[in-house]
Image: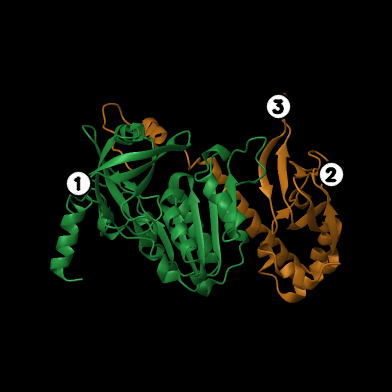
Chain colours: A green, B orange
Amino acid sequence: MSADVQAQAAAASDTMLPYRVVRRTAPTHDTVTLTLEPVRRAAGRFRAGQFMMLYSFGVGEIAISISGDPTGRGDVLEHTIRKVGAVSGALSSTGVGGLVGVRGPFGTGWDVESAAGGDLVVVGGGVGLAPLRPLVLAALADRGSYRRVVVITGARTPADLLFAGDQESWVRDGSVELHRTVDHPSPQWPGRVGFVTEPLAQLHLDPARTTGFLCGPEPMMRFCAQALLRKNVPGDRIRVSLERTMECGVARCGHCQLGPLLLCRDGPIVTYTVAEPLLGVREL
Amino acid sequence: MPTAEDLSGFANLETLDSDDLGKLARAGREVSFPAAYRVIQEGQRADRCWLIRSGRISLDAQVSGRDDIVVQTLDAGDLLGWSWLVPPYRWHFGALTTEPVDAVEFDSATLTGLCEDDPRFGRDLILALFEALLARLQATRARLADLYRDPAEFRVSAQLPGTATAETP
């Protein structure tokens, strides 16, 4: 891409566009999924794993991963938001018909296409499954290009598992090997109780043809990456999504700096080979 | 009787060579349990262990005044039963099948005898079990860390008076 084209693309991404909430659902007690449609002009098409800066008018702006289908309508955005602060709380409270400011898409993607012909191992913990959903949907839309698609999801309780309906349909049609596990089961929970590393450790993988995609709390990603490394999956084929406070989204402000990386530009998704030495530094 | 090839499918035993797997296989027997079958009763004598081939087993603890608490589940590929290794040789948790289970069962006296007769085999077997135990310990620690908790709760507990709270996605 030439410098001019890059500059034009960056300028287009940096323009805040008004979007209207056309659907609002609550997949769990502390998350909300907003479906957004452009009021006038749509943002550029996104890739699985990218994020948008979402602005709640008069409150503030935060980075939120895209949880929608990258193979669907290019102008519709879907974001799954956990209420953890003022802005995410305001965004979560925005009802159908409400307006949200949108900039983006920003950041690197999962680049699932580069794993074509091989096996995908997708591990999402808690709300970390949200940025992985577009990856799974993209893989399923081109299912013939991949061998195994293994999805492991973990949550505190069964009620905290995101996208339960999606997961059931993935299993029903046999396209995904799904392992769900929780820390604290309800009496009715028929599934696993334990940490995501446990089903991961039991997988029989072809390490030369496996790519791992990990998203969740950093310790979870570290443990899962180590489990994959023990199975001889190379670090440069383990991808992790890193999270630091994003402010500008266009590599200007430096708030999201992690060592030599500006995560809004160089991340949020990087290989574990890149991430491992950075995650071990306490001050970063 | 299971074969060495049957046991080679267990990730926990992948460090054992085919001779060791053969020796272990000859000590095992295939068993099946129906759903809702109590394999282990907490507090009873621990004299066996199992490699689960299919199905699911929940580990539970008795708590007075409450229903039994499920602390973990074990699935195909997992090892059930550690308490036979160390005194007082009593089960610390119960084990209940939640669906029909096929497993390879080992008698602890037989395993102990094999280890005593061939210390090299014993060392390799104990190391394989230790690796599985370490993985289970690390997973338990990760769960204790409550990693999926709302990050806002962490910030509130870690925040100094008067400091601002940044929001991350």
In the rendered structure, which amino acid carries the disc numbered 3?
A: Arg
Look at mark 1 in the image and give the residue it sits on.
Answer: A16
Kindly indicate whether the residue at mark 1 contacts the one at mark 3 (C-beta within 8 angstroms). no
Using the image, name the chain to which the residue with label 3 belongs: B
Q: Is residue A163 above or below residue B114?
A: above
Is A215 on the left or on the right of B124, as rendered? left
Image position, residue A132 (x, y; %): 44, 54
As drawn, which residue projects farthest toward the left? A4
Residue B66 is labelled as 3
Q: Which of marks 1 and 2 is in front?
A: 1
Image-quadrant location for residue A206: bottom right
* Nearer to the camera, A2 or A128: A2
- Mark 1: few, some, or many residues within 10 Å (few <14, many ≥20)? some
Image position, residue A34 (x, y; %): 37, 41
In the rendered structure, which amino acid carries the disc numbered 2?
A: Arg
Q: Can residue A236 be seen in this view?
A: no
Point out the tag, 3 or 2, that comes first from the N-terminus: 2
Is A178 on the left or on the right of A103, as rendered? right
Residue A152 is labelled as none
In the rendered structure, which amino acid carries the disc numbered 1?
A: Met
Kindly indicate whether the residue at mark 2 contacts the one at mark 3 (C-beta within 8 angstroms). no
Using the image, name the chain to which the residue with label 1 belongs: A
Residue B45 is labelled as 2
As drawn, which residue projects farthest toward the top? B65
Q: Is residue A184 visible?
A: yes
Kindly indicate whether the residue at mark 2 contacts the one at mark 1 (C-beta within 8 angstroms). no
Image-quadrant location for residue A1: bottom left
Residue in the image at 25% along x and 51% along y: A42
SS category of the residue bearing label 1: loop
Residue in the image at 43% along x and 58% along y: A135
